[in-house]
Image: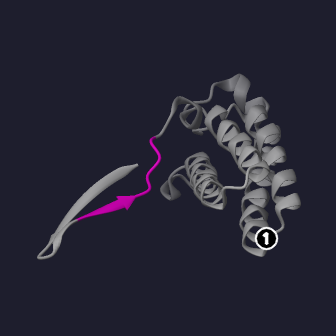
Amino acid sequence: MEQQETRHTSGAIARLVPLEAFGPDVHALSPYARDDEDFRQGGVICDSLEELSRHLKWLDDDYQSGQLDRLEARARSIVMLADQLGLRRVGQVAADVVYCIDGPDETALAATASRLMRLVTQALDHAAGPITAL
């Protein structure tokens, strides 16, 4: 997470800007980093990415509506999809969401669910490639 400092007359205020660094697992989804063998399995990858996209939307809906049982099932599904796609960090954070649901700390759950949504969004954006490539 990146931290920026803004000065006001009353003192320093730290402004947190949530950014996730790209990792090797996200770079593996790049359409330009695949070899011929990976393209043969493109249908499986596309299907998994579409399912991950649907889970991202439902994850937010379940969290906003307080449906923790559905949120837990959704996070477990994301763990499996992330494993299929090689998105290790996404799977780890999804597992952390499941752990936070079992605990009584709502703040930890909110922060971890937000991080999961950022990571999934980042992975999906990266997998789509630049718009100019279309």
Residue positioned most to the left: 9
User: Which quadrant of the view contains residue 8?
Assistant: bottom left
Pick the front one: 65 or 58: 65
* Looking at the image, residue 21 lies above or below residue 86: below
Q: In what element is the residue under mark 1? A: loop
Q: Position of residue 132 (x, y in %)?
A: 48, 57
Residue type, numbered disc 1 = Gly
Q: Position of residue 39 (x, y in %)?
A: 72, 32
The residue identified by callout 1 is 66
Span shown in magenta = 13-21
Residue positioned most to the front: 104
Pick the front one: 73 or 52: 73
Measuring 66% from the left and 61% from the top, which residue is drawn there?
A: 106
Q: Is residue 69 left or right of residue 101?
A: right
Q: Position of residue 29 (x, y in %)?
A: 62, 37
Measuring 65% from the left and 32% from the top, which residue is drawn there?
A: 88
Asked if the stretch drawn in magenta spans residue 118, the answer is no
Q: Is residue 96 left or right of residue 69?
A: left
Q: Position of residue 73 (x, y in %)?
A: 87, 52
